[in-house]
Amino acid sequence: MTGASTYNIFGKRVFVAGHRGMVGSAVVRRLASENCTILTADRRELDLTKEELTLRWLEANHPEIVVHAAAKVGGIAANNNFPVDFLCDNLAIELNVIRASHAVGVRRLLFLGSSCIYPKHAKQPISEDELLTGPLEPTNEWYAIAKIAGLKMCQAHRRQHGDDFISAMPTNLYGPGDNYHPDHSHVPAALIRRFHEAKLANVPTVTVWGTGTPRREFLNVDDFADACVFLLKQYSSDMPINVGSGDELSIADFATTVADVVGYKGKLVFDTSKPDGTPRKLLDSSRIRGLGWRPNIALRPGLAAAYADFLKGHGRHLEVNASS
C-alpha cells in the first residue's frame, strides 16, 4: 500500500503544536504560503503537558488539522542526564494532543517522530519496516521510546476510531531556529556554536565527540517542513513514513564542512572517550520519493543559511555572543 491520498488544506484551520521550536517554526513558515489559517499557542497560554488545558484550548479553537511538532528535545548529553524528563514529558504531550484531537474531531493529524525510533543496528538504509526489530541506541532510548509511543497512538486511533492520523520520521535536521545550548543541542547546532566561539577566540583546536567515523544523513528543516505540508495533502496510512535527504557522510566530514562554512581554520580533534551513538543511520525515503516529494536544499548552502541565522541571534538557548 503506497498511502497515496488527496486532502485539500485550502481554508482549513491548522494548529502547529510546538511552533517555537526549529521544526514547528519551519512548518509555520511553509504554511504561510498556503491559503489556510495557522493557529499557535506558546507555553504561557498552553502547557501541553496538562491534559485539561490542552483539551480546553482545542475545544475553543477547533482546528481541523494538527501538526504535532511539540517535544522536549536535546542531544546525547541531555538524553543521558534527564531520562525521566525526556520520557515522561514527551509521553504526556503526545497523549494529551492526540487524545484531545480525537475528542474535538480533528480531521487530520501529522505526528512528527524521529529516526532514533529505529534499532541501533537496523539494516541500512533503514526502512519503516525496521521499527521494533531490535534494541535502540542506549544514549537516546528515552526519547525514542516516547516517539514510538506517539506513532503507535496514531496507529491505534486509526484502527479503533478511523481517525486520519499519520506519522512522519525525519532524519537528522538542521537549520534556522535550532537549539544552540552548550549542553543540550544536536550535532549541527553544537558544531556551529563550537566553531564560531573557537574562531572568535583564535583557539587552535576544537574537540568533537567520538571517533568521527559514524555516518549520518542531514536534512534542512525547511525541506522537512515542505515534506510535512506535502504529506498533509498526499499521504494517509497507518505506516509511519521516512523523510530524509538520501545523502550521508561521516561525522568527521560533516564537522569539516561546518568548520569551513563558519570560517574556522584550526584543527579538529576527536575525543574517542565519548560515545559515537549509532554507527550508521541512513533512512530509506523511497516511499515519500515514490509519492513525488524531493528535497531542494543542498547541505553547504543550507549550513551557510543556518550559520547566518545563528549570527542574527535567532536560535534558542543562545547563550553566546554571536557577533561575526
Image (cartoon, rainbow, N blue to C red):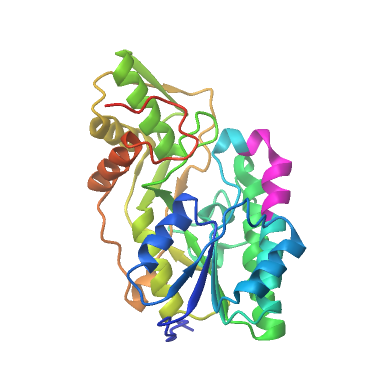
Q: Is residue 146 left or right of residue 129?
A: right
What residue is rendered at 62% in x and 39% in y? 79
Examine the residues drawn in magenta and state their main secondary structure: helix
Percent of width and height locating residue 213: 40, 35
What residue is rendered at 66% in x and 53% in y? 90
Q: Quadrant of residue 93?
A: bottom right
Q: Which residues are magenta?
A: 79-90
Q: Nearer the viewer, residue 113 or 46?
A: 46
Quadrant location of the C terminus in the rendered image = top left
Percent of width and height locating residue 140: 61, 44
The residue furthest right is 52
Above or below, comparing residue 158 to residue 72 in the picture: below
What residue is rendered at 70% in x and 50% in y? 89
Q: Nearer the viewer, residue 143 or 108?
A: 108
Does 289 appear in magenta? no
Does 87 appear in magenta? yes
Is there any visible trace of residue 120 in the rendered image? yes
What residue is rendered at 31% in x and 26% in y? 323
Q: How many marks?
A: 0
Q: Quadrant of residue 92?
A: bottom right
Above or below, comparing residue 295 to residue 239 in the picture: above
Percent of width and height locating residue 14: 50, 72
Above or below, comparing residue 174 to residue 192 in the picture: below
Q: Is residue 177 left or right of residue 267?
A: right
Percent of width and height locating residue 80: 65, 35
Is there any visible trace of residue 153 in the rendered image? no
Q: Nearer the viewer, residue 22 or 47?
A: 47
